[in-house]
Amino acid sequence: MSTARRIEQGKHQPNKGSPRPWRTRQDPFAEVWESELVPMLEKEPQLRPITLFEYLQEKYPNQYDQSKLRTLQKRVRDWKATFGPPKEVMFAQEHLPAEMGLSDFTHFKQATITIAGKPFDHLLYHYRLAYSGWQYVQIVQGGESFVALANGLQNALLKCGGSPKIHRTDSLSAAYRNINSQADEDLTQKYEQLCNHYQMQPTRNNRGLAHENGGIESSHGYFKRRLHQALLIRGSGDFGSIEDYQQFIDTVIEKLNRRCALKFQEEGQHLQPLPAHQTADYELLSVRVTCHSTITVRCVLYTVPSQLIGQRLTIHLYQNRLVGFLGNQRVMELARVYPSQKGDKRRAKSVDYRHVIHSLRRKPRAFLQSRWREEFLPNDQYRRIWKQLQEQFKPDEACRLMVESLYIAAVQDKEYVVGLWLEGQLRDKTLNLKSLKQKFASIPVARLEVSMVNQHPLGSYDQLLQYEPNKFSPANLTDSVEIPATSIYATTMAGDRNASHS
């Protein structure tokens, strides 16, 4: 009561004296703090309390038990805050509209992603406008590369409707040789041409200082948390195709971009107009077709039409496909395959029986011991058929029936129909080579074509209807502009099927 009375009368004053000079408990480090620990900290300020504590335990056995560690941690913390060296300061940056766009690659490890039940190893390409925070994310297979950077960046610029004045990355090997610190001298030629094409100045942060690229690094974490939450709501990380997964990512990004719609609309007015055409987002390779009717590209073996055996092809290697040219003539297009393993075992195959079936028909016995026998069989249905053929027929007859069935399926584009008929005949045990040929003899044989035509989605051309030179016309903020999808729309050589992968 007396304290309350003094407070009401204004007589109670806080202690204005000096801090008390005495300790309330004994200092366990009194003998070593000034004489040993402080000199060590002055010499090496990066020393951590646990390191100093272990040093004391080794030098003075049984004198410093574990309960003293917390006391030393507080003592070191206070010393560094009072006498330690100056710390690095992060300076907030002010960005102007359309001044800078940032690119980076990131892993998504918060959830397991599978495609049709199989683990999907991938990266995410992430682009962000520094002023508005508008973002674009694209799936990348095969690791960081110039092809992945060029494809992702150009799709992002197309999506936002213009290019910034500066394009910033970290020290990506896809963009820089990383030989020296002089960015102007260290650019890869292809990346320099890419930036020049879109009138962007390439810049990068200092190696090892990720915070200098914080405009994109911090967005990685936020986006991946949102993607993870969306997957939890969805209830599964399994997708039917890569395209389905990309569409799911697009949905998450679209929701994030709604938050910065007004600033993006403002920034869009200052973006530089895009050139009439995109620049090359592929890598040039030269390969020779072997006597096995194969080529090897980036540790992956592909079969090609046998007419090309012995020829040297120029390959345009894209992010999701490879296109082959004989001289100036386009002669083939294949879906790109990525090895699932790393290191010395980083190998894969993409085998299409239709490429070699004419030759295999002339020597069907080669099917039995072929290294690619399992890959020649286009799906599980045909694998079951081959197993039944082996059970009901001798090896030579089983090979002739299997190869003839594949030949008919290829040239008549009747893979599914032939498979159903074979299953019925095997079930009734009435299958023979004569009945197989008679059944499908009346169907005209289609000529096996070498060339494959890539037909990409045409929706992206709709934006040209609203394009005005030297004026920004971004996509409607609620109805995003279509961009070319990652899937391949091809007129295949003899029907629709995916090449066998292993």
Image (spheres, rainbow, N blue to C red):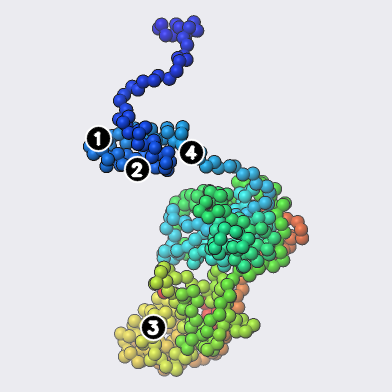
Q: Residue at x 68, y 63 (%)?
A: 196
Quick one: label 4, few (<14), some, or many (20+) residues within 10 Å?
few
Q: Which one is in front in this view, the residue at disc 3 or the one at disc 2? A: 2
List the residue tagged with mark 2. 51
Task: Report, in whole angstroms, how far the alpha carbon at label 4 lies from the one at label 1.
Answer: 30 Å
Question: Marks 4 and 2, Cα distance to the nearest angstrom?
Answer: 19 Å
For the residues labelled 4 and 3, the Cα–Cα distance comes to 66 Å
Q: Nearer the viewer, mark 3 or mark 1?
A: 1
Residue corresponding to mark 1? 63
User: Mark 1 and mark 2: span between their CA atoms?
Assistant: 16 Å
Element assignment for label 1: loop
**In the rendering, at what x and y percent does residue 380 appear?**
40, 76
Q: Secondary structure at mark 2?
A: helix
Whether residue 206 is visible here, answered yes or no, is yes
Say if mark 3 contacts mark 1, CB within 8 Å.
no
Instruction: Name the kind of residue labelled 4 in the image.
Output: Pro
Identify the residue at image location x=44%, y=36%: 80
Query: In the rendered view, would you say 299 is above or below 62?
Result: below
Residue 487 position (above or below residue 254): below
Instruction: Where is residue 332? Give x, y as percent.
Output: 57, 81
Name the residue carrying label 4: 85
Q: Which part of the image, by quadrant, shows the C terminus?
A: bottom left
Residues at circles 3 and 2 in contact by the CB criterion of under 8 Å: no
Of labels 4 and 3, earlier in sequence is 4
Q: Locate residue 80 relative to residue 448 in the image: left or right.
A: left
Residue 147's x, y, as percent?
A: 57, 67
Amino acid type indicated by mark 2: Thr
